[in-house]
Image (spheres, helix red, strand yellow):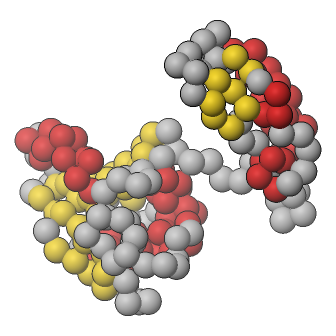
Amino acid sequence: MGTITTQDGTEIFYKDWGTGQPIVFSHGWPLSADDWDAQMLFFLQHGYRVIAHDRRGHGRSTQTGDGHDMDHYADDLAELTAHLDLHDAIHVGHSTGGGEVAHYLARHGESRVSKAALISAVPPLMVKTDANPGGLPKAVFDDLQAQLAPTVPSSTATCRRGRSTDSTGRAWRLRTRSSRTGGGKG
Protein backbone atom coordinates (compact mmCIF):
# COMPACT_ATOMS: atom_id res chain seq x y z
CA MET A 1 0.00 0.00 0.00
CA GLY A 2 1.22 3.45 -0.81
CA THR A 3 0.37 6.90 -2.08
CA ILE A 4 1.39 9.14 -4.92
CA THR A 5 0.97 12.89 -5.16
CA THR A 6 -0.43 14.08 -8.47
CA GLN A 7 0.70 17.20 -10.32
CA ASP A 8 -2.11 19.24 -8.72
CA GLY A 9 -1.12 18.09 -5.21
CA THR A 10 -3.80 15.46 -4.70
CA GLU A 11 -2.65 12.40 -2.77
CA ILE A 12 -3.90 9.13 -4.28
CA PHE A 13 -3.90 6.01 -2.11
CA TYR A 14 -3.31 2.65 -3.78
CA LYS A 15 -2.83 -1.05 -3.05
CA ASP A 16 -0.23 -2.98 -5.05
CA TRP A 17 0.05 -6.70 -4.38
CA GLY A 18 2.01 -9.47 -6.07
CA THR A 19 3.96 -9.87 -9.27
CA GLY A 20 3.06 -10.86 -12.81
CA GLN A 21 0.84 -9.20 -15.38
CA PRO A 22 -0.85 -6.23 -13.68
CA ILE A 23 -4.60 -5.88 -13.28
CA VAL A 24 -5.67 -2.35 -12.31
CA PHE A 25 -9.08 -2.02 -10.66
CA SER A 26 -11.03 1.28 -10.74
CA HIS A 27 -13.98 1.47 -8.34
CA GLY A 28 -17.42 3.01 -8.70
CA TRP A 29 -18.81 5.99 -6.84
CA PRO A 30 -18.76 6.34 -3.80
CA LEU A 31 -16.70 3.23 -3.10
CA SER A 32 -12.97 2.69 -2.55
CA ALA A 33 -10.20 0.27 -3.49
CA ASP A 34 -11.37 -1.99 -0.65
CA ASP A 35 -14.43 -2.97 -2.65
CA TRP A 36 -12.15 -4.91 -5.02
CA ASP A 37 -10.45 -6.99 -2.29
CA ALA A 38 -12.19 -10.29 -3.16
CA GLN A 39 -11.30 -9.95 -6.84
CA MET A 40 -7.77 -8.83 -6.02
CA LEU A 41 -7.20 -11.83 -3.76
CA PHE A 42 -8.55 -14.19 -6.42
CA PHE A 43 -6.26 -12.86 -9.16
CA LEU A 44 -3.32 -12.58 -6.77
CA GLN A 45 -3.67 -16.31 -6.07
CA HIS A 46 -3.60 -16.91 -9.84
CA GLY A 47 -0.27 -15.16 -10.39
CA TYR A 48 -1.30 -11.60 -11.26
CA ARG A 49 -0.08 -8.33 -9.83
CA VAL A 50 -3.19 -6.49 -8.61
CA ILE A 51 -3.55 -2.76 -8.08
CA ALA A 52 -6.51 -0.71 -6.86
CA HIS A 53 -6.62 2.96 -5.94
CA ASP A 54 -8.96 5.24 -4.05
CA ARG A 55 -10.10 7.88 -6.53
CA ARG A 56 -9.60 11.50 -5.47
CA GLY A 57 -12.26 12.43 -2.93
CA HIS A 58 -12.79 8.76 -1.99
CA GLY A 59 -11.44 6.51 0.75
CA ARG A 60 -7.92 7.36 1.88
CA SER A 61 -7.13 9.73 -0.99
CA THR A 62 -7.26 13.50 -0.56
CA GLN A 63 -10.82 14.69 0.02
CA THR A 64 -10.77 17.37 -2.66
CA GLY A 65 -13.54 19.84 -3.33
CA ASP A 66 -12.68 20.05 -7.01
CA GLY A 67 -11.29 17.90 -9.81
CA HIS A 68 -14.25 15.54 -9.78
CA ASP A 69 -14.42 15.04 -13.53
CA MET A 70 -13.26 12.39 -15.96
CA ASP A 71 -10.23 14.41 -17.10
CA HIS A 72 -8.83 14.51 -13.56
CA TYR A 73 -9.75 10.88 -12.89
CA ALA A 74 -8.04 9.75 -16.12
CA ASP A 75 -4.97 11.89 -15.41
CA ASP A 76 -4.72 10.50 -11.87
CA LEU A 77 -4.89 6.96 -13.26
CA ALA A 78 -2.20 7.82 -15.82
CA GLU A 79 0.07 9.21 -13.09
CA LEU A 80 -0.45 6.07 -10.98
CA THR A 81 0.23 3.82 -13.97
CA ALA A 82 3.43 5.72 -14.79
CA HIS A 83 4.56 5.81 -11.14
CA LEU A 84 4.19 2.03 -10.88
CA ASP A 85 5.74 1.62 -14.36
CA LEU A 86 2.90 -0.66 -15.47
CA HIS A 87 3.01 -2.26 -18.92
CA ASP A 88 0.69 -4.80 -20.55
CA ALA A 89 -1.89 -3.97 -17.86
CA ILE A 90 -5.47 -5.15 -17.77
CA HIS A 91 -7.76 -2.34 -16.58
CA VAL A 92 -11.07 -3.21 -14.93
CA GLY A 93 -13.55 -0.45 -14.15
CA HIS A 94 -16.98 -0.55 -12.55
CA SER A 95 -19.52 2.28 -12.85
CA THR A 96 -17.60 5.57 -12.54
CA GLY A 97 -14.43 3.48 -12.63
CA GLY A 98 -15.48 2.16 -16.04
CA GLY A 99 -15.83 5.71 -17.30
CA GLU A 100 -12.44 6.48 -15.78
CA VAL A 101 -10.83 3.57 -17.65
CA ALA A 102 -12.48 4.49 -20.96
CA HIS A 103 -11.46 8.13 -20.55
CA TYR A 104 -7.92 7.10 -19.57
CA LEU A 105 -7.58 5.09 -22.79
CA ALA A 106 -8.99 7.91 -24.91
CA ARG A 107 -6.89 10.60 -23.23
CA HIS A 108 -3.58 8.76 -22.63
CA GLY A 109 -3.57 5.99 -25.22
CA GLU A 110 -3.18 2.27 -24.87
CA SER A 111 0.60 1.87 -24.93
CA ARG A 112 0.60 0.52 -21.34
CA VAL A 113 -2.66 -1.43 -21.68
CA SER A 114 -3.32 -4.95 -22.96
CA LYS A 115 -7.08 -5.16 -22.24
CA ALA A 116 -9.89 -3.26 -20.60
CA ALA A 117 -13.10 -4.52 -18.99
CA LEU A 118 -15.89 -2.04 -18.37
CA ILE A 119 -18.53 -3.28 -15.94
CA SER A 120 -21.79 -1.29 -15.81
CA ALA A 121 -19.70 1.70 -16.79
CA VAL A 122 -21.03 5.23 -16.86
CA PRO A 123 -21.50 6.10 -20.52
CA PRO A 124 -20.17 9.18 -22.22
CA LEU A 125 -22.65 11.95 -22.94
CA MET A 126 -25.37 10.34 -25.02
CA VAL A 127 -27.83 13.19 -25.56
CA LYS A 128 -27.49 15.56 -28.51
CA THR A 129 -26.26 19.02 -27.52
CA ASP A 130 -24.41 21.82 -29.29
CA ALA A 131 -21.20 20.36 -27.84
CA ASN A 132 -22.23 16.79 -28.79
CA PRO A 133 -23.94 16.99 -32.19
CA GLY A 134 -23.53 13.22 -32.73
CA GLY A 135 -25.69 12.38 -29.71
CA LEU A 136 -29.27 11.14 -29.69
CA PRO A 137 -32.18 13.60 -29.53
CA LYS A 138 -33.63 14.09 -26.05
CA ALA A 139 -36.95 12.75 -27.38
CA VAL A 140 -35.36 9.28 -27.61
CA PHE A 141 -34.71 9.32 -23.85
CA ASP A 142 -38.14 10.80 -23.12
CA ASP A 143 -39.75 7.99 -25.14
CA LEU A 144 -37.67 5.37 -23.31
CA GLN A 145 -38.75 6.82 -19.97
CA ALA A 146 -42.39 6.78 -21.07
CA GLN A 147 -42.07 3.13 -22.10
CA LEU A 148 -40.52 2.21 -18.75
CA ALA A 149 -43.11 4.08 -16.67
CA PRO A 150 -45.73 1.29 -16.95
CA THR A 151 -43.21 -1.18 -15.47
CA VAL A 152 -43.25 0.53 -12.07
CA PRO A 153 -44.27 -2.15 -9.51
CA SER A 154 -47.96 -2.34 -8.69
CA SER A 155 -47.13 -1.66 -5.03
CA THR A 156 -46.44 1.92 -6.08
CA ALA A 157 -49.48 4.10 -6.66
CA THR A 158 -48.97 7.33 -8.59
CA CYS A 159 -50.36 10.44 -6.93
CA ARG A 160 -50.95 13.96 -8.18
CA ARG A 161 -48.18 16.49 -8.80
CA GLY A 162 -45.38 13.96 -9.28
CA ARG A 163 -45.62 12.25 -5.90
CA SER A 164 -45.93 8.54 -5.31
CA THR A 165 -46.76 6.36 -2.34
CA ASP A 166 -45.11 2.99 -1.80
CA SER A 167 -46.77 -0.05 -0.24
CA THR A 168 -45.99 1.22 3.28
CA GLY A 169 -47.79 4.51 2.63
CA ARG A 170 -44.61 6.61 2.58
CA ALA A 171 -44.75 9.37 -0.01
CA TRP A 172 -41.77 10.10 -2.20
CA ARG A 173 -41.21 12.66 -4.91
CA LEU A 174 -40.69 11.54 -8.50
CA ARG A 175 -37.71 13.52 -9.75
CA THR A 176 -37.20 14.15 -13.39
CA ARG A 177 -34.77 16.51 -15.05
CA SER A 178 -37.60 18.91 -15.87
CA SER A 179 -38.84 18.97 -12.23
CA ARG A 180 -35.33 19.72 -10.95
CA THR A 181 -34.82 22.57 -13.39
CA GLY A 182 -38.27 24.06 -12.89
CA GLY A 183 -39.63 23.12 -16.32
CA GLY A 184 -42.39 20.74 -17.23
CA LYS A 185 -44.86 19.05 -14.93
CA GLY A 186 -44.13 17.71 -11.50
Look at the image and tell me whether residue 85 can be seen: no
Residue at 22%, 53% in the rendered image: 34
User: Disc count in the image?
Assistant: 0
Q: Is residue 45 left or right of residue 97?
A: left
Look at the image and tell me whether residue 101 can be seen: yes
Q: Quadrant of residue 139?
A: top right
Q: Is residue 136 left or right of residue 25?
A: right
User: With respect to residue 120, does 23 lie above or below?
Assistant: below
Q: Is residue 142 left or right of residue 66?
A: right
Q: Position of residue 22 (x, y in %)?
A: 24, 56
Q: Quadrant of residue 5?
A: bottom left
Who is closer to the viewer here, 146 or 131? Answer: 146
Image quarter where the C terminus lies is: top right
Who is closer to the viewer here, 89 or 121? Answer: 121
Q: Position of residue 71 (x, y in %)?
A: 56, 72
Q: Is residue 166 left or right of residue 118?
A: right
User: With respect to residue 164, does 22 lie above or below?
Assistant: below
Residue at 16%, 74% in the rendered image: 2
Q: Position of residue 70 (x, y in %)?
A: 55, 66
Residue at 50%, 64% in the rendered image: 104
User: With respect to residue 80, does 146 lie above or below?
Assistant: above
Residue at 78%, 29% in the rendered image: 145
User: With respect to residue 159, does 140 lie above or below?
Assistant: below
Image quarter where the N terminus lies is: bottom left
